[in-house]
Amino acid sequence: MDFRVCSLFSGSSGNATYIGTEKTHILVDAGVSMKNIIAGLKQIGVEGRELNGILVTHEHSDHIKSVGAISRKFDVPVYANKETWEAMESQIGAIAAKNQRIFDNSMDFYIQDINVQPYEIPHDAADPVGFSFYFQNKKISITTDLGHTNNKIIKAVMDSDLVILEANHDIDMLMAGPYPIYLKKRILGKKGHLSNVDSGNALLEMIKGKVTHVLLAHLSKENNYPQLAYQTVVEILENNGVKVGRDVLVDMTYRDRASNFYHIG
Ligand SMILES: [Zn+2]
Ligand SMILES: [Zn+2]
């Protein structure tokens, strides 16, 4: 039995990640159309009706666009903390009472055979979280949409086998780019998004644990390129003695298509 993960879509334009085992199929966020998510799942051999839960990190539209539609069509429970539920309720439409699941950030819970541990992240939403997932002795973590990292987050992620981490923007591209100044400030702020350099520096800490796989995620369309994010992060790691490809594998996620499908076990 292995632990499976695939980023179906990732970026400021919409996010959805698949986490699963032989028995269990979970979506983290559903921020693109239902049609695209169902097509993405099909590519990895999962049908919409097999979904056991949708976990929501926070209420921004690039994370919740089709949460309601998927829940209603396939009768899937939606998991979010209380503040996020309150913030997203009016946007996702009616969810059957039995499919409204509220978690507490400090408590882990199970969806079938997968153990889920939320942790708080600094971002300008009601009560945003990242998630760690445990199955047998393997661990996968997802951390996107955060303005900075802290010891708690590093600790929560450190002993993961695979980490999905935000590398949102290149600071020079953002500064020189077309965004209005208030938006630049928001993105660069303590509750905004991690830059490529922030991401590389956070990974230096995280991979002191047992992280062997890293997927860079939530790239900005206007202020980043996959190649640039990859190069910046790899350079930071290599300059600090990490052999990329040997000590740790760094891979990408994509805004418009699925990443590699990882089976860990
Ligand atoms: Zn986002
Ligand atoms: Zn966000």
Image (tube, rainbow, N blue to C red):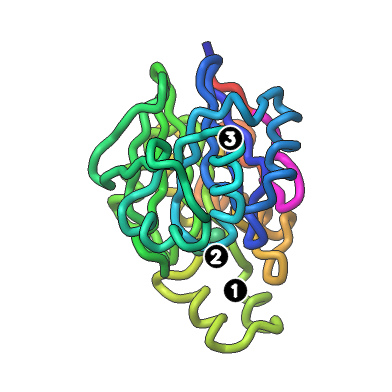
Q: Are marks 3 and 1 in contact (CB under 8 Å)?
A: no
Residue at (49%, 59%) from the top-left corner?
Answer: 145
In reply to whether residue 259 is colored magenta, the answer given is: yes
The residue segment tinted magenta is: 253-261
Which numbered disc, 3 or 1, marks the residue that appears first in the sequence? 3
Q: Is residue 145 visible?
A: yes
On the image, numbered disc 2 is attached to which residue? Answer: 195
| Residue type marked 1 | Ile
Q: Farthest left residue?
A: 106
Left or right: 205, with 241 as reference point: left
Who is closer to the viewer here, 97 or 200? 97
> In the image, what residue occupies the spot 64% across and 56% down?
14
* Marks 2 and 1 close (CB-CB < 8 Å): yes
Residue at 66% in and 25% down:
46
Identify the disc placed on residue 171.
1
The reply to whether residue 249 is in sight is no
Under mark 3, the amino acid is Tyr
Q: Characterize the local packing of mark 3: few (<14), some (14-19) or many (20 or more) Cα atoms within 10 angstroms.
A: many
Query: Marks 2/3: CA distance?
Result: 24 Å
Depicted 27 relative to depicted 87: above or below: above
Q: CA distance from mark 2 to mark 1?
A: 6 Å
Q: Looking at this view, is 17 or 167 the one in front?
A: 17
Question: For ligand 1, which image quadrant applies?
Answer: bottom right
